[in-house]
Image (cartoon, rainbow, N blue to C red):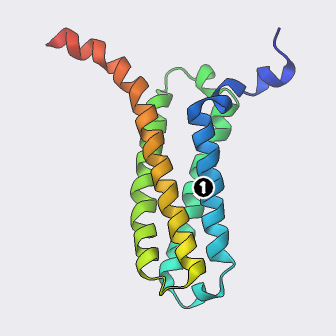
């Protein structure tokens, strides 16, 4: 018998590999943002202002997706392919965070705090790649019957 919490929240998604990856991505993005935000070196480096904008923007998008998924919106809106949505979100996030993290690493001038922020950004990129690989598997299994039937 389902409890009220299980009816409101999709705890199955939050406990899955994709849900755990999303939560981990959020933690690392927030840590990267806070490390840069609390550093006084960022006042002179425009690269880190852009780094902050990208990390908080991607954080917001992933947080919104996680909340919508945790609230069970995919079961209420079956017309949207949520695996494709997650795949596109992770791909766009990877394409945004990776160049900014590389630029932040180059512009760090051996300041340990800024190197740590860029390494957190690159770690998040690895998590995005893992999430892309996991979200591609259900997408590929949905498409493979159509592909094999046409060949």
Can residue 141 be seen here? Answer: yes
Quadrant of the drawing holding the C terminus: top left
Q: Is disc 1 placed on a helix, strand or loop?
A: helix
Q: Residue furthest bottom?
A: 44
Q: From the viewer's side, name the closer residue of 46 and 118.
A: 118
Q: Residues within 10 Å of mark 1 (few under 14, many from 20)?
A: many
Quadrant of the drawing holding the N terminus: top right
Residue 36 spot, x, y in % from top left: 61, 75
Q: Which residue is located at x 51 percent, y 87 percent?
A: 45
Q: From the viewer's side, name the closer residue of 63 and 98.
A: 98
Q: Which residue is located at x 66 percent, y 54 percent?
A: 27
Q: Quadrant of residue 148?
A: top left
Q: Which residue is mark 1?
A: 59
Q: Residue furthest left?
A: 151
Residue 113 spot, x, y in % from top left: 60, 78
Give the left or right position of residue 15, taking residue 137 as reference.
Answer: right
């Amino acid at each position: 018998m389902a409890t009220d919490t299980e009816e409101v929240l999709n705890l199955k998604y939050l406990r899955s590999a994709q849900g755990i990856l999303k939560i981990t991505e959020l933690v690392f993005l927030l840590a990267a943002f806070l490390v840069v935000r609390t550093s006084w070196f960022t006042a002179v480096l425009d690269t880190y202002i852009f780094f902050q904008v990208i990390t908080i923007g991607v954080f917001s998008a992933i947080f919104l997706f996680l909340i919508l998924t945790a609230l069970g919106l995919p079961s209420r809106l079956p017309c949207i392919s949520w695996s494709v949505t997650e795949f596109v979100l992770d791909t766009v996030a990877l394409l945004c965070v990776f160049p900014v993290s590389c630029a932040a690493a180059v512009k760090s001038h051996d300041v340990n705090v800024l190197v740590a922020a860029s390494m957190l950004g690159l770690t998040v990129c690895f998590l995005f790649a893992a999430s892309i690989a996991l979200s591609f598997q259900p997408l590929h299994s949905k498409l493979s019957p159509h592909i094999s039937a046409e060949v």
